[in-house]
Amino acid sequence: MADRRPESTTVTTGDSRQAQRPMPEPVIMNASLQRAVTWASALLILAAGLYLFLLGDRPEAVGETSSTMLQIDLNRASEQELALLPQIGPKTAKQIIADRNQNGHFVSLEDLARVHGIGAKTVETIRPYCIVELAGQSGSR
């Protein structure tokens, strides 16, 4: 079998001079090593896929754990606690406190929509993280 690799290659430098440099020897794997590398790669990809499937962010897993998450009571939360909620910053947290002081306690989570800047989308986004408890009640949502 004839080897068709060139013996050297021509490299042009910045000042128009040409230099001859020998070509590096290619790395050639034998057939059994190549098969082993192929199988190892396939197993690694399979293991990564299995990991993502079993431990990934699956909607059913999120739904199962949402009942055990820490939830903020809108009628007792401080400004700092409210600011921890998604899509609620310090300014909106102040507005929630001001509305609660002016209009009284929230009866349901939907009452939060009466605060300027909070709409139905925001209410749905923060729903898993909030509860509304009235005096003498515990655990209402």
Image (tube, rainbow, N blue to C red):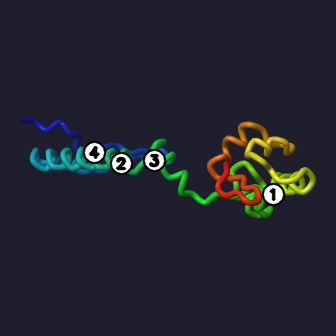
Q: What is the distance, in whole Å, between disc 3 and disc 2 at their CAs?
A: 10 Å
Q: What is the distance, in whole Å, between disc 4 and disc 1 at their CAs?
A: 45 Å
In the image, what residue type sits under mark 2? Leu
Q: What is the distance, in whole Å, between disc 1 and disc 2 at their CAs?
A: 37 Å
Q: Are marks 4 and 1 in contact (CB under 8 Å)?
A: no
> Which of labels 1 and 3 is toward the front?
3
Observer-nearest of 132 and 81: 132
> Is tag 3's residue or tag 4's residue first in the polypeptide sequence?
4
For this orientation, the residue located farthest to the front is 136
Reading the image, the residue beneath label 1 is 90
Q: Is residue 93 above or below residue 80?
A: above
> Is tag 4's residue or tag 1's residue first in the polypeptide sequence?
4
The disc label shown at residue 61, or none: 3
Q: Are marks 1 and 3 in contact (CB under 8 Å)?
A: no
In the image, what residue type sits under mark 1? Pro
Q: Residue 88 vs residue 67: left or right?
A: right
Reading the image, the residue beneath label 4 is 46
Give the secondary structure at mark 4.
helix
Say few, some or many: other residues with alpha carbon within 10 Å of mark 3 (under 14 / 14 to 19 / 20 or more). Answer: few
In the image, what residue type sits under mark 4? Leu
> Is tag 2's residue or tag 4's residue first in the polypeptide sequence?
4
Q: What is the distance, in whole Å, between disc 1 and disc 3 at their CAs?
A: 31 Å
Reading the image, the residue beneath label 2 is 54
For this orientation, the residue located farthest to the left is 1
Q: What is the distance, in whole Å, between disc 2 and disc 4 at their CAs?
A: 12 Å
In the image, what residue type sits under mark 3? Ala
In the image, residue 118 lies at what x, y percent?
A: 80, 42
